[in-house]
């Protein structure tokens, strides 16, 4: 994940953090399957609109995140 992050966003640190929102991962964890999440989408700190009016993701951030997650799953599958 660190190598791939550096490919897309050189110099950006890869750090674990806790998200307060819910995910589908709890269903897997309750079945004994370790589950981790990764986002790969960047937002402007002054324009975060999670679950509110006019929630949005920038076009560039959307496509970068899509490609990042595709390559991450592909790398983990090998």
Image (spheres, rainbow, N blue to C red):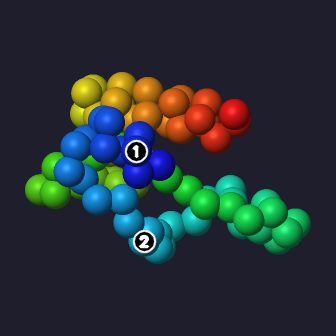
Q: Along the horizontal axis of the image, is 51 left or right of 49?
A: right
Give the label on residue 72, or none.
Answer: none
Residue 1 position in % (x across, y down): 47, 49
Sequence-wise, the earlier of marks 1 and 2 is: 1
Residue at image mark 1: 3
- Dividing the picture into quarters, in which one does residue 31 lie? bottom right
12 relative to 57, above or below: below
Q: Secondary structure at mark 2?
A: loop
Q: Secondary structure at mark 1?
A: helix
Q: State the residue at coordinates (41%, 51%).
A: 2
Q: State the residue at coordinates (27%, 26%).
A: 59
Which residue of the protein is positioned furthest toward the left in this rendering?
A: 46
Q: Residues within 10 Å of mark 2 (few under 14, many from 20)?
A: few
Whether residue 56 is visible, yes or no, is: no
Q: Along the horizontal axis of the image, is 24 left or right of 15?
A: right
Residue 64 position in % (x across, y down): 34, 30
| Residue contact at pointers 1 and 2, CB within 8 angstroms | no
Say which of marks 1 and 2 sits in front: 1
- Which is nearer the eye, 31 or 72? 72
Where the C terminus falls, by quadrant? top right
State the CA–CA distance, disc 1 to disc 2.
Answer: 18 Å
Residue at image mark 2: 17
Q: State the residue at coordinates (40%, 45%).
A: 3
Q: State the residue at coordinates (25%, 27%).
A: 60
Q: Residues within 10 Å of mark 1 (few under 14, many from 20)?
A: few
Residue 28 position in % (x across, y down): 79, 60
Whether residue 30 is visible, yes or no, is: yes
Instruction: Give the tally of numbered discs.
Output: 2
Q: Along the horizontal axis of the image, is 38 left or right of 56?
A: right
């Amino acid at each position: 994940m660190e190598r791939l992050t550096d490919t897309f966003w050189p110099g950006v640190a890869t750090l674990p953090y806790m998200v307060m929102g819910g995910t589908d991962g709890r269903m897997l964890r309750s079945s004994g399957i370790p589950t981790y999440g990764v986002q790969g989408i960047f937002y402007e700190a002054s324009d975060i609109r999670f679950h509110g009016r006019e929630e949005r993701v920038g076009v560039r951030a959307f496509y970068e995140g899509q490609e990042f997650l595709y390559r991450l799953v592909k790398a983990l599958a090998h």
